[in-house]
Image (tube, grey):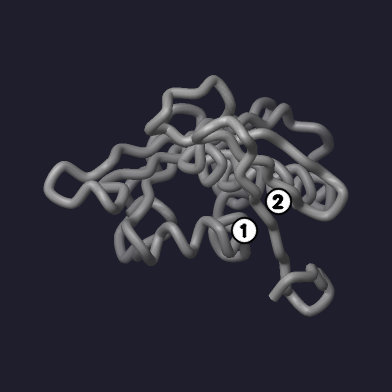
Amino acid sequence: MTNSDPERGEVAVTAAATTAPGRFIVSARANHLVSDSRLTGGEAIHAGELLLAALASCALANIENRAAESGFGVVGVTATASHTRGVEDPTRYARTLLEIGIGALDDSRGWALVDNFVATCPIYNTVRRGSGIEITLNGRRRPASPGAGDQGTR
């Protein structure tokens, strides 16, 4: 697949090496950014950081949109994503954490927004199914409740 067709769920990004070893130009539609290999220690964003940026960006867009649809107004949403490379298997991330901050809402409304994000974001769910992911809201994990299944805190 070389072209994006978002209406069909198809998205394409291209990356090309530059003349500088370990430096790449990443293009999505008409947007371009520089990425560096983590192995060369370049100053530009690395591939793993791009994955985390996609996760955090999806969370922000989803939660802001759902908050507006629900009439919650602007709620000051933040997202911090981090991961730790596996020790036994460094080809995968052993731990991924997504920390969501939502101001001016009680926990029940905040978790409802997080639950909607968890239920609809393909980036989140791909990471969750691949290696697992933890999620917090305003610095706290979801309170335990009887009969609660996996609700994004895996």
Side of 105 relative to 147 (left or right): right
Q: From mark 1 to mark 2, how far is it between C-alphas? A: 8 Å
Residue at point 38%, 66% (across, down): 129
The reply to whether residue 137 is in sight is no
Residue under pointer 1: 116
Question: Which of the 4 image quadrants contains residue 31?
Answer: top right
Image quadrant where one finds the C terminus? bottom left
Q: Position of residue 56 (x, y in %)?
A: 59, 40
Q: Position of residue 10 (x, y in %)?
A: 73, 73
- What amino acid type should be assigned to the residue bearing mark 1? Asn
Element type at marker 1? helix
- What amino acid type should be assigned to the residue bearing mark 2? Asn
Task: Give 14 or 17, whichever is nearer the viewer.
Answer: 17
Residue under pointer 2: 62
The residue positioned farthest toward the bottom in the image shown = 8
Q: Residues within 10 Å of mark 1 (few under 14, many from 20)?
A: some
Q: Position of residue 144 (x, y in %)?
A: 32, 49
The residue positioned farthest toward the front in the image shown = 19
The reply to whether residue 16 is in sight is yes
Residue at point 53%, 46% (across, down): 51
